[in-house]
Image (tube, helix red, strand yellow):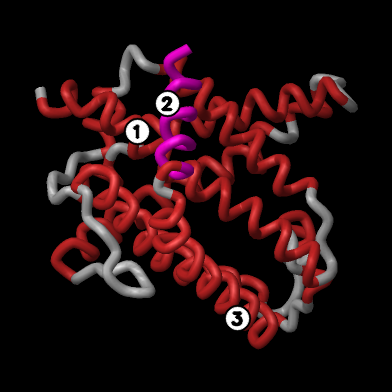
Amino acid sequence: MQGFSIVSAAILSMVRDRGMTLRLTVLPWAVAMATVFAILELIAGLGLSSLGYDQLLASMRTPGYLPAIMISLFVVCTIGAWVGLSWHRHVLLGEKAVAVLPRNNSETFDPYFDAVMKFTALTLGVVMMIKYLMVPLVPVLGLAGPGAKVISVAINALLVTILLRHALILPAAALGKPVSMSTSWKVTSGFTGPIFSIAFVVVIVVETARMLPAGNLAALVLQFTAVWAGLILCFGVITELYKVRTRKLAA
């Protein structure tokens, strides 16, 4: 199972180099989350009881919700780009962090941030597809309970597969060798099965984070720690996937 081998390689890479993994990801992620909490509280007045995946969805009619979410998304994209660029360059080029926070300059960051924004736009499109097209099909098909959950996981894994097949634009941009989304899709052709198994693991991690309790600070820290784990797993998987398909990408 090549897909699970890629996931295993990503996890082993992060565990073996756990000092650098923590150094490159924990503080930036903590800064991102603290900033998002402040934005949601100051602009939308959402307290801790509202800060969880499902709780945020339920708060959509709150005044100030949309601008708070848009600003928060920009913050997460910016810091996520910072973390992703550092991780890709560390694994693929052996670049080490020399400060408390990862180092990046505009020459490398700007093209990577551009790739992140394109990927974010694609991700939002996929999320909307899940919310408005796929999820409503579950009750229409008469599914409930475990059956509905299985169908939901399968749909999400399929759509994450679509995202992963476009994701090689990120490590390519980090190395200063940008490629288009269509090129990324092309070089991952014939590799859909392994990518789907990778997507299945990612979906399980995200679903686990969603099921964690929210509503108080300790529960919230636990939930966002799970999201952090999912985030670095995604960066690790995308990096390993790039390494596997680099030869085809170069061709």
Report, in whole angstroms, how far the alpha carbon at label 2 lies from the one at label 3: 37 Å
Q: Residues within 10 Å of mark 3 (few under 14, many from 20)?
A: some
Question: In this figure, which residue is indicated by the disc labeled 2?
Answer: 6
Q: Are marks 1 and 3 in contact (CB under 8 Å)?
A: no
Question: In this figure, which residue is indicated by the disc labeled 1?
Answer: 240
Indicate which disc residue 55 carries: none
Q: Residues within 10 Å of mark 2 (few under 14, many from 20)?
A: many
Question: In this figure, which residue is indicated by the disc labeled 3?
Answer: 39
Report, in whole angstroms, how far the alpha carbon at label 1 lies from the one at label 3: 34 Å
* Amino acid type, mark 2: Ile
Quarter of the image where one finds residue 165: top left
Say above or below: 108 vs 245.
below
How many numbered discs?
A: 3
* Amino acid type, mark 3: Ile
Q: Whole-percent x and y of residue 231?
A: 51, 50
Q: Whole-percent x and y of residue 4?
A: 50, 21
Mark in front: 1 vs 3: 1
Is residue 213 shown in magenta? Answer: no
Say above or below: 156 vs 21.
above
Say above or below: 82 vs 7.
below
